[in-house]
Image (tube, helix red, strand yellow):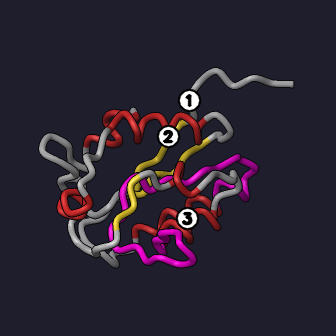
Amino acid sequence: MSVRTSVARGLFVTGTDTGVGKTLIACALLHGFAARGLRVAAMKPVAAGAVRRRGVWYHDDVVQLRAAANVDAPQAVVNPYCFAPPIAPHIAAQVAGVTIRMAVIKKNYARLGRNADLVVVEGAGGLLVPLGRRLSAVDIPVWLG
């Protein structure tokens, strides 16, 4: 039996626009690393533009990322902040009355890392996309470092 005491390494995938290929690249990385025998988990900390099916919010990117990963994790861990309106994440959070907190993202990243060799994290837009008053997408890879 082995016990993991360190957090998995991570890769952060970002791009400046919707439809630029972030999910395609993140899924390709997940498949590639899994094919090399690594345990890979996916994470999309913040997603806007979700749809409700059978009482649960789903975001297409998150569905694809979870399917590409070989480490199974609950949707709420892979995507702790999921919003319905397809608008900028900080505005979607404000509309929902939610404050995006780095501590929540870090906690879920660590949880994913306990069972993975690598966590591929997909951003919501480019590095400078605001996530709150004092938080932007660039903070995610910096804080998860």
Question: Are circles 1 and 3 on residues that touch, CB within 8 Å?
Answer: no
On screen, residue 4 versus residue 135, left or right, reads right
Q: Are marks 2 and 1 in contact (CB under 8 Å)?
A: yes
Q: Secondary structure at mark 1?
A: loop
- Which three-letter amino acid code belongs to the residue tagged 1? Val
Q: Which segment is the magenta one?
A: 32-60
Instruction: State the separation of the CA atoms marked 3 and 2.
Output: 14 Å
Say which mark, if any, is on residue 65.
3
Query: Image quadrant of residue 30?
Result: bottom right
- Residue drawn 50% across the image and 40% down it: 108
- In the rendered image, residue 54 lying in the magenta stretch gets the answer yes
**Numbered circle sitting on residue 7:** 1
Q: Which quadrant does the C terminus fall into?
A: top left
Q: Is residue 126 visible?
A: no
**Disc 3 + disc 2, Cβ < 8 Å:** no
Packing grade of label 2 (10 A; few <14, some 14-19, many >=20) is many
Q: Is residue 23 left or right of residue 63?
A: left
Task: List the residue tagged with mark 2.
Answer: 109
Q: Residue furthest front?
A: 55
Q: Verify whether residue 41 appears in magenta.
A: yes
88 vs 5: above or below? below
The residue that appears at 64% across and 21% down in the rendered structure is 5
Three-letter code, disc 3: Leu
Quadrant location, the N terminus = top right
**Amino acid found under the numbered disc labelled 2:** Tyr
Which element carries disc 2, helix, strand or loop? helix
| Mark 1 to mark 3 CA distance (whole Å) | 20 Å
Q: x and y percent of residue 62 in the render?
A: 50, 66
Q: Nearer the viewer, residue 69 or 107?
A: 107
In the image, residue 6 lies at what x, y percent? 59, 24
Gap in Å between the C-alphas at discs 2 and 1?
Answer: 9 Å
